[in-house]
Amino acid sequence: GDSVTQMEGPVTLSEEAFLTINCTYTATGYPSLFWYVQYPGEGLQLLLKATKADDKGSNKGFEATYRKETTSFHLEKGSVQVSDSAVYFCALSESAGANNLFFGTGTRLTVIP
Amino acid sequence: AAGVIQSPRHLIKEKRETATLKCYPIPRHDTVYWYQQGPGQDPQFLISFYEKMQSDKGSIPDRFSAQQFSDYHSELNMSSLELGDSALYFCASSLGVGQGQPQHFGDGTRLSIL
């Protein structure tokens, strides 16, 4: 079945450091891929998405590229800020049928000044 | 912009009681999803509705049921509550079920079972 494997956390970085959170997936067909962010006490917010191979999603300085050959969708940001501290979830939805999301286990990021 | 509204935000129940969670999707969104997130865990898909019909079913216990109404809001009914049902319950909505349609999440209902 479909699944997402996400880099385990927690991750602690200093402000302005480079961020990478690894995400790989297993799916039949061609899923759509997403990164969601969850701030403390809040719901999940869509950060970025990619719907086909080689697509790059980007938002708020974050980027992720849909790599079909390595079944990966790693999240990157060149210079993190304290306000980026949150839990990040990689997710996929199947290419056909219902659109429900399969989530990775989440990676907690803490950015210290 | 209007977001997904969930109510209540917090709910405390005792074992064997019932609970009803409500979800109001973003205006014009016709698809609603329910997820359960246990402490420190990733969200698990429960059930979804498209145009008031169930479109997919995940790991929803038989004790739970849900429906989508004519105004597209949805309710998750939970009966014979157990301690293990304590979790954050998210509703999400989207426009259609086409591939890649992003889901927009509410802030969740935190259910605590005593």
Image (tube, coloured by chain):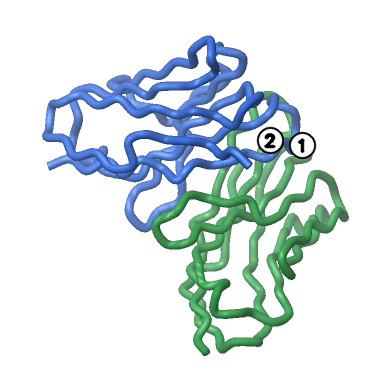
Chain colours: A green, B blue
The amino acid sitting under disc 1 is Gly
The amino acid sitting under disc 2 is Glu
The x and y percentages for residue B96 are 70, 24
In the image, what residue occupies the spot 78% across and 49% down? A50
**Rendered image: mark on residue A29:** 1
Does dot 2 land on a helix, a strand or a loop?
loop
Q: Nearer the viewer, residue B37 or A2?
A: B37
Quarter of the image where the N terminus of chain B is located: top right
Q: Is residue A20 above or below residue A72?
A: below
The x and y percentages for residue B91 are 48, 35
Which residue corresponds to mark 2? A94
The x and y percentages for residue A77 are 71, 74
| Mark 2 touches mark 1? (CB < 8 Å) | yes
In the image, what residue occupies the spot 71% across and 71% down? A76
Chain of the residue under the numbered disc 1 shown in the image: A
Q: Is residue A11 above or below residue B87?
A: below
Q: Earlier in the sequence, mark 2 or mark 1?
A: 1
